[in-house]
Amino acid sequence: MARVELSHPGKVLFPDDGITKADLAAYYEAVAPVLLPHARDRPLSLQVYPGGIGRPGHFMKHIPRYFPDWVARQELPKRGGTVTHVVARNADTLRILAQHNAITPHAPTARTDRLDRPDRLIADFDPPDDGGERWADIVDAARLAGTVLRDAGLEPFAMTSGSRGLHVVAPLRREAAYGAVLALGKDLARVLVAARPDALTTAFKKDEREGRVFVDVLRNRPGQTAVVPYGVRARAGAPVATPLAWAELEDPHLHPRAWTLRTIAQRLAHGGDPWAQIVSAAASPRSSARRLAAITG
């Protein structure tokens, strides 16, 4: 396999920070050992910014025909036809995505060999769009979600989104279809909102949230995706979606954009990937659904 050569490596993708296409490619090559275990064998959807983040971008799902044959692919049905996604299995794939200005990879909660059986439950805690971060409420909700998930027999893992919120993820054995996993997520959300009604909501419409944090479990539906761990976000500073050790939720300096393309290497050098053992922590969604149903009464 020939090394992926970059065209226009000096092209600036983050104008306020001087971060170039070459910087993005070098970043994804460097973090490939920790990113790929979370993305491997998942059909990717990509946020692409041909003119850098200062101009409008778009989602790319269908792999261009001119991509080399060695890039892994997965064809999936869509309304009126099919779409062929990139599947990242090596650092060279991440590099070729950077070559095409793909800044942020997103992935579903299932892998290509069993696309009907999710291996993740995701709860995304998003602040309201009223200008307030509500960060304390987000962290409190994430900690509470961890308690509820543990009571249900699941192991919680936390991640800064690199944008405005936090994700709490529970690894699952691949026993249940999407409908059952979504129902499990909705039960979790109901418990959290019942415990914090003034701070949290499951209202999908933004005008109904009344300044509360949105507990989003809708990513647990077929076809939905979430940012890949260690994915760069298209925001000033190039913040990175960063897996956390659970105890870091107690850190008063924690922030959703705490680590960036330029600073994540130092974190990984000192502590490695806090999610390195996430696969071995997978538990039964069926058993957890029964326990959570008992909690909700």
Image (spheres, rainbow, N blue to C red):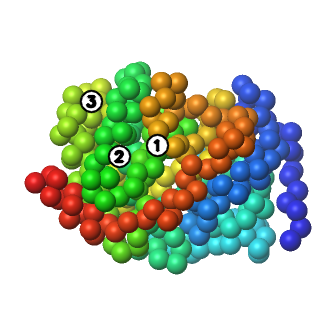
Q: Nearer the viewer, mark 3 or mark 1?
A: 1
Circle 1 residue: 246
Q: Is residue 164 above or below residue 159?
A: above
Residue shown at the point (55%, 53%) measured from the top left: 275
Q: Is residue 237 above or below residue 125?
A: above
Helix or strand or loop: what does disc 2 sit on?
A: helix
Label 1–label 2 contact, CB within 8 A: yes
Residue shown at the point (17%, 53%) measured from the top left: 295
Q: Tell me, yes or no, if residue 272 can be seen here.
A: yes
Label 3–label 1 contact, CB within 8 A: no
Distance, label 1 to label 2, CA atoms, is 9 Å
Q: Name the residue type under label 2.
A: Gly
Tell me residue 196's x, y (percent): 22, 34
Distance, label 3 to label 1, CA atoms, is 22 Å
Q: Is residue 224 above or below residue 145?
A: below
Residue shown at the point (36%, 75%) measured from the top left: 175
* Position of residue 189 in the picture relative to residue 25 (left or right): left
Helix or strand or loop: what does disc 3 sit on?
A: loop
Circle 2 residue: 146
Q: Name the residue type under label 1.
A: Trp
Q: Earlier in the sequence, mark 3 or mark 1?
A: 3
Circle 3 residue: 199
Quadrant where the N terminus lies? Answer: bottom right
Pick whichever, 77 or 116, lies toward us. 116
Pick whichever, 16 or 239, lies toward us. 239
Residue shown at the point (72%, 25%) measured from the top left: 16
Q: Tell me, yes or no, if residue 85 can be seen here.
A: no
